[in-house]
Amino acid sequence: MSCPWSLVSVHWIDAYDSDNGWIEIETYKPEACHVVSVGFLWPDCLDGYVTITGSYMPDEVPNLKTIGMVTHIPTAMVKKVTILDQPKIELTLQHPHRML
């Protein structure tokens, strides 16, 4: 069962600062820090932010109650949001202690 929220990639500009120490004003060139984050879009979580989460509990689908790894990105810093296809992957994993 897939997450009821859209899986997205968010391209955004992060906050950044310069190297430590003394900086020559004439030669200093600030550079934007471009970031791509991927997660499930939490709709209407926090005004002024695009909010994504990296984890959810499939036993709670379709009514999510518990999520993990939440990231709030200021809307003004967002350059692009792309909806991604949610892959249909079923994995059967052995418990590490039973892999003998």
Image (cartoon, rainbow, N blue to C red):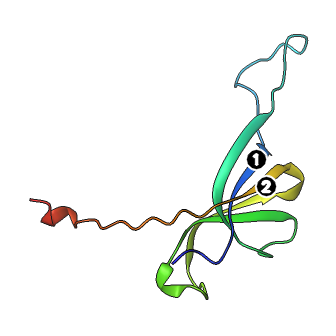
- Residue 11 is marked as 1
* Farthest left residue in view: 100
Pick the quarter of the image with the C terminus.
Answer: bottom left
Res 14 → quadrant: top right
For badge 2, the amino acid type reads Val
Do the residues under discs 2 and 1 have CB atoms within 8 angstroms?
Answer: yes
Task: Give neighbour class at mark 1: few <14, some 14-19, many 20+ (Cα, 10 Å).
Answer: some
8 lies left or right of 50: left
- Element at badge 2? strand
Res 16 → quadrant: top right
- Element at badge 1? strand
**Residue appearing at x 71%, y 42% in the figure:** 35
Residue pointed to by mark 2: 81
Label 2 vs 1, first from the N-terminus = 1
Q: Nearer the viewer, residue 78 or 5?
A: 5
From this view, report whether residue 42 is shown above or below residue 49: below
For badge 1, the amino acid type reads His
